[in-house]
Structures are given as C-alpha cells and as structure tokens.
Image (cartoon, helix red, strand yellow):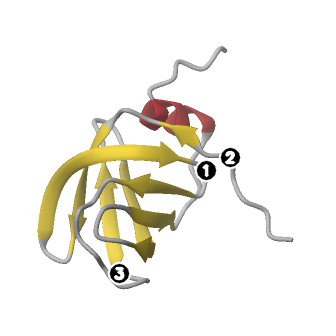
Amino acid sequence: MQYRSRRIPSNADVTVVICGLQLTIPLIDVSETGMKLALAYEFPPDTAITIQSARLHLHGVVSWSTQFETGVRLLQPLGKADLGELAQIAWAA
C-alpha cells in the first residue's frame, strides 16, 4: 500500500508559472509532498510548474490534470511552517 500525505484544505491564492503562462489561482489543498490547484487548463504529466506565494517559491511537476483541477508533486517536501502558510493555518508553537 502506498503512503499518501495528509491533505489540508486551503483558501489561499497562489501564482503559478507553467508553459509560459503566469496565473494567480486558488489552492484547493496542500500536503507535504504536493497540492491540488484550481487550474482551468489541462497539462500533460511531468510538466514543470513553479508555485509562488508571498514568501515561498516552489518547484514541482504535474501529476494529473483535468479541465478544472491540476495535481502537483513538489520536488522538495514542505516543512511544517511552509505547509501552514499555504494552508493559512497558524501552527501552535
């Protein structure tokens, strides 16, 4: 059985750069290893994507894509603080 990271819902907007497009879109959910974006374009698997927030600059690849959503696998796992920022959660210290 393959381990799947816990998904955390998000209401954040992120900026993505993919195939020459730069778009600000909603982040649907995020985990340590990936995220689901409300991206209304279909892209082939393994397409490079950059995700930016106020403080973060992340790199990943498309895992799957439909005409309404895109799954992204991050090239580096997120730490707890970065995960909290994207999920708009203030983690207890």
Give the CA distance from mark 1 to mark 2. Answer: 8 Å
Number of callouts in the render? 3
Is 4 left, or right, of 70 in this rendering?
right
| Residue ID at (36%, 61%) | 69
Residue carrying label 1: 32
| Secondary element at tag 2 | loop
**Are the residues at dot 1 and dot 2 in contact (C-beta closer than 8 Å)?**
yes
The picture places residue 28, in percent across and down from the top left corner, at 41, 45
- Rendering quarter of residue 72: bottom left
Give the CA distance from mark 3 to mark 2. Answer: 24 Å
**Are the residues at dot 3 and dot 1 in contact (C-beta closer than 8 Å)?**
no
Q: Quadrant of the C terminus?
A: top right
Three-letter amino acid code at the position of disc 1: Glu
Q: On screen, 79 above or below 48?
A: above
The picture places residue 5, in percent across and down from the top left corner, at 69, 53
| Secondary element at tag 3 | loop
Mark 1 or mark 2, whichever is nearer to me: 2
Residue carrying label 3: 47
Three-letter amino acid code at the position of disc 2: Arg
| Secondary element at tag 1 | loop
| Among the two numbered marks 1 and 2 on one chain, the one whose residue lies closer to the N terminus | 2
| Residue ID at (31%, 53%) | 38
| Among the two numbered marks 3 and 2 on one chain, the one whose residue lies closer to the N terminus | 2
The picture places residue 34, in percent across and down from the top left corner, at 53, 58
| Among the two numbered marks 3 and 1 on one chain, the one whose residue lies closer to the N terminus | 1
| Residue ID at (61%, 50%) | 32
Residue carrying label 2: 6
- Rendering quarter of residue 17: bottom left
